[in-house]
Image: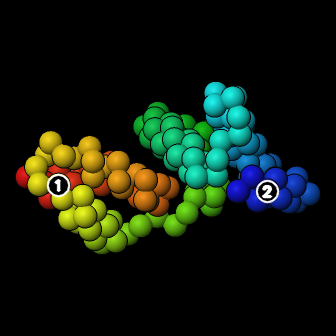
């Protein structure tokens, strides 16, 4: 993942694609910050979580900028979101997510809302970076009523 990021950054530099280069540098900075906090290079398995956090922040900013009528900043945020999403694994469709949640609920043997934590932990372990856990939480609640 980091090698791909370096290669993409070099390609953007050579192509003089400033918006893309800026977004790639933001990703590098976020990964370096995560490494500093962890006091070691974070494993590739944890990188999607960092990227998803970045996307969440940018979506919030995008909504604020659009509401305020600041189109240029909103466009910049949208561009950054698009670049960051390139580095994430393909997201599961809603149907795939429902199947995965149902399978994990059955596998864990969860029967009540009290066991939601077990189900969510198993989902995060298996589908990190591929599933929207906010939506998954709603699906788990629905199944465990």
Which numbered dot is residue 67? none
Q: Secondary structure at mark 1?
A: loop
Residue 38 locus on image (x, y percent): 63, 31
Q: Quadrant of residue 86?
A: bottom right
Q: Label 2 neighbourhood size at 10 Å, few (<14), some (14-19), many (20+)?
A: few
Observer-nearest of 118 and 3: 118
For residue 100, above or below residue 134: below
Q: Nearer the viewer, mark 1 or mark 2?
A: 1
Location of residue 37 with respect to 41 vertically, above or below: above
Q: Nearer the viewer, residue 121 or 9?
A: 121
In the displayed structure, 119 sits above or below 104; it is above
Left/right placement of residue 87 relative to residue 16 reads left
Residue under label 1, please give it.
110
Q: Residue at x 43, y 59 (%)?
A: 126
Compared across the picture, whether 80 is left or right of 115 comes to: right
Label 1 crowd (10 A; few <14 / some 14-19 / many >=20) = some
Residue 3 circle label: 2
């Amino acid at each position: 993942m980091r090698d791909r990021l370096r290669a993409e950054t070099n390609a953007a530099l050579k192509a003089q694609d400033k918006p893309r280069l800026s977004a790639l540098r933001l990703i590098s900075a976020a990964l370096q910050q995560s490494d500093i906090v962890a006091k070691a290079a974070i494993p590739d398995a944890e990188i999607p979580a960092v990227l998803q956090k970045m996307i969440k922040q940018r979506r919030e900013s995008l909504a604020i900028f659009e509401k305020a009528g600041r189109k240029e900043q909103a466009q910049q945020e949208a561009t950054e979101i698009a670049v960051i999403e390139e580095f994430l694994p393909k997201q599961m469709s809603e149907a795939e997510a429902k199947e995965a949640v149902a399978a994990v609920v059955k596998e864990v043997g969860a029967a009540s809302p009290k066991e939601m934590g077990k189900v969510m932990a198993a989902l995060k372990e298996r589908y990190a970076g591929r599933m929207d856990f906010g939506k998954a939480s709603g699906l788990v609640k629905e199944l465990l009523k």
